[in-house]
Amino acid sequence: MKLTTVEQTQAFGRRLAAVLRPGDLVLLAGPLGAGKTALVQGIGAGLGVQGPITSPTFVIARVHRGPVPLVHADAYRLGDRPDPRAEIDDLDLDAAAEEAVTVVEWGAGLVEQLNDEYLLVRIDRLDDDTRVIELVPHGGDWARRLERM
């Protein structure tokens, strides 16, 4: 799927939110400026969470309250330890995992252990600022759910 504006990326996030449910883990992968946070803004809007969604790069993780809470984490700055997964464990992201949708930017290779079933969203940014999004389901009923989008 190709998206050409931030608004289209946010709209895609709202569509994705329609197939998300509490307990879901979504990993976002892509270069700086690819639109990961814009996608999460759309997901948050689709879930009906309260307050603005901004990049959690400096606070590492935020919880946004709503009918289905959203845990938004950014693993970009993690990695000072020999095993960065220990830092993920310190964030205690699994504490709210049952009742929230958890979205982790830069989480590939670090947070998959939080859930046997997860969705990897790859976002690539082309030279003309077009975003190309690929959804890669892992386990569970993700493939069936994504067909509804």
Image (cartoon, rainbow, N blue to C red):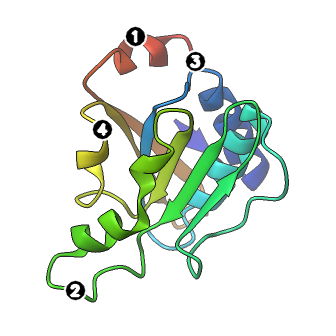
**In this picture, residue 4 sits left or right of residue 93:** right
Q: Residue at x 47, y 33 (%)?
A: 98
Residue 80 can be seen, yes or no: yes
Q: Which residue is mark 3?
A: 149
Give the foreground label among 3 and 4: 4
Q: In this rendered view, identify the residue nearer to me: 112 or 142.
A: 112
Q: CA distance from mark 3 to mark 2?
A: 39 Å
| Residue bearing mark 2 | 81
Which residue corresponds to mark 4?
A: 115
Alpha carbon separation for disc pair 3 and 1 = 10 Å
Residue 55, horizontal then vertical, whole percent: 64, 69
> Badge 2, how many Cα within 10 Å: few under 14, some, many 20+?
few
Element type at mark 2: loop
- The amino acid at mark 4 is Asn
Q: Are marks 3 and 2 in contact (CB under 8 Å)?
A: no
Disc 1 residue type (three-letter): Arg
Spot the residue most to the left: 82
**Residue pictured at 64% horizontal, 50% vertical:** 40
